[in-house]
Amino acid sequence: MPDDVRMFASPSSPEALIGIFKKTVATMPSGALKSVQIYVAVPAAFKDRVAAVLHPTGATFIFLDPAKPIPQRKERLR
C-alpha cells in the first residue's frame, strides 16, 4: 500500500508539466518515491513521456486520459 497519493493535471500545457517533473526528479535520489502513487492527467500523446520522466522516482504512475470520463460506482453517486 502506498504511503502517499499525488495527483497532477495539465491537459492544456503538458510540456510545462513535463518540464517541472524533469527539474524535480533531477533533484531526487533514485527510488525516492517508491511508496507513492502519482496520478497524472495529460493528453494520451504525452503518457509515455511522463512515464519515462517519473520512472527513476520508483513511484507508481497512473495515467488519466482527460478525453475519457472516469467511470463512477453507483454507490458513490448516491
Image: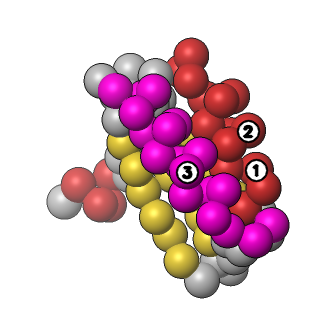
- Residues marked 1 and 2 touching at CB (< 8 Å): yes
Where does label 1 land, which residue? 55
The residue wearing badge 2 is 52
User: Residue 69: x and y, percent?
Assistant: 36, 31
Q: Amino acid at mark 1?
A: His
Check disc 3: other Cα within 10 Å, few if <14, some if 14-19, many if 20+.
Answer: few
Height in image: 76 above or below 1? above
Q: Earlier in the sequence, mark 1 or mark 3?
A: 3
Residue 33 can be seen, yes or no: yes
Residue 48: x, y in percent? 69, 28
Q: Residue at x 56, y 24 (%)?
A: 46
Q: Residue at x 45, y 27 (%)?
A: 15
Kindly identify the amino acid type of the residue bearing the numbered disc 2.
Ala
Examine the structure image and report whether residue 17 is included in the region drawn in magenta: yes
Front residue (pair 21, 41)? 21
Label 3 element class = helix
Number of numbered discs visible in the structure rendering = 3
Identify the residue at horizontal 46%, vertical 64% (top origin).
6
Residue at image coords 37%, 42%: 9
Q: Which residues are magenta?
A: 13-30
Whether residue 69 is visible, yes or no, is no
Q: Identify the image quadrant of residue 3.
A: bottom right
Mark 2 or mark 3: name the one nearer the start of the chain: 3
